[in-house]
Each structure stands twice: as C-alpha cells, then as structure tokens.
Image: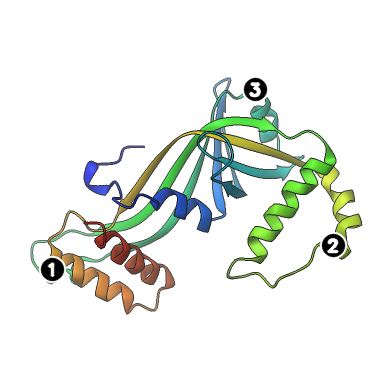
Amino acid sequence: MYVPKLFRSRRPDFADTLLATEPWGLLITAVDENIRGSHLPFVYEPSTGENGRLHGHMNRANPHWRDLERADEAMVVVTGPGAYVSPELYEVTPAAPSYNYTVVHVYGTPTLVEGSETTLALLRATVERFEQGPDGRDWDIEPSLDYARRIVRGVVAFTIDITRLDAAAKLSQNKTPELQDRVERAFAASHNAAARAVAHEMREEKEWT
C-alpha cells in the first residue's frame, strides 16, 4: 500500500488499536493467477507469535479456503472510520474535495486449523469478541454448544501469522492547522457517525504531532 510519509500515523499503537477495535476485514490471496477476496470476521491476538496473529473462519462451501492451503502469503485489509471532506468545510477558494480515512493492511502466513474442537474454540473466541463489542448482548454460547458442534463441520478456520503491517491515517495532515480544526469541528458536529469517528481520530492524531 502506498502511504505518503505525511499520512503515516505518529501514534505508536495506531495499528494495534485499529485491529483490536475493527473485527471485520477483507481477506485477499493470489494463487495460480487466481485472485480471491472474502469479507470475514477476524480476531486479533497481538501477543501471539513474533508480530501477532489474526484468526478467522469461513463457510466450507467458500472455495477460498483451498487457496489458503497453498498460499505463501495472505493480506487482510481492515478499514477504520472514513468520511468525505467537502471543500465547503475549508471556507477558502480555490479548494478541492478529499476523503479522510484510516486503514491497516496485514500481511502474513496463513495456516488452516485442524480439528473440530480447535475450530470451535476459535469460533467461541470470535463470538466473545463480538458480544463484548458495541452491538453485543452478552449472549452465552454454552447452551448452544451441541448445535455449534454440529454446524462447525461446515466451517473452515485459519490463522494468519503476521509478518508485516502497512497503516495509513489520512486525517487532513496536508492542510494548515486552521483548516484541520475546521474539518474536525464539522465532523464532530455531524449527524454521520462515521464523520464523528473521524473527528475522534483527528483529535487522537493531534496529540502526537
């Protein structure tokens, strides 16, 4: 991923935080000139392995898992908050529209998980990750374990041992402090939840400038 130096976050925990808070990603592999992408849930384990690990799962009917068997490397794209920046926010002329966003590209070595109980354990970890999130309801999987053991036969779980990360935080750093403040204030007051999230990212980034 091309990331201009200006848009490389100064926050030392930027990538870790984004991976920990955004549990949805795009898995991409290229095997035998066949490029596949699957949108999947992921759980980030920063303390596992040399550089951390992602684990995920997909429906066994999805042929993508067969490529994971042979892929030397996989990429997972995890996107954070993003919002359109209208030139009207700058209150200057001339001006051009832009887009503020946060994203991490994860590269690593994929490995299929063997055994139904290990697969079930990873599924439970995924459920717990989502149930602890803003949309969770503290649902307890225990009463449904027998059902989970039946449906796990149709699931393929995998891990990705992370080898490197590319992260971008494009948050109006190419604008003057005055224009950055205008964008941040407008986003913070927006009815758009994504814009408000970007305003939060802009404030966080400023603390490290």
Q: Is residue 123 left or right of residue 192?
A: right
Q: Nearer the viewer, residue 39 or 21?
A: 21
Where residue 83 sits, quadrant-wise, is bottom left
Residue 168 pos. (x, y %): 34, 47
Q: Nearer the viewer, residue 159 or 66?
A: 159
For the C terminus, the quadrant is bottom left
Label 2 is placed on what type of residue? Glu
Q: Element at badge 1?
A: helix
Q: Give the residue displayed 30% in from the left and 41% down from the top.
A: 3
Residue that mark 2 sits on: 142
Q: Element at badge 3?
A: helix
Q: CA distance from mark 3 to mark 2?
A: 35 Å
Check contact, mark 3 vs mark 1: CB within 8 A.
no
Question: Label for residue 178?
Answer: 1
Residue that mark 3 sits on: 70
Residue 188 pos. (x, y %): 32, 75
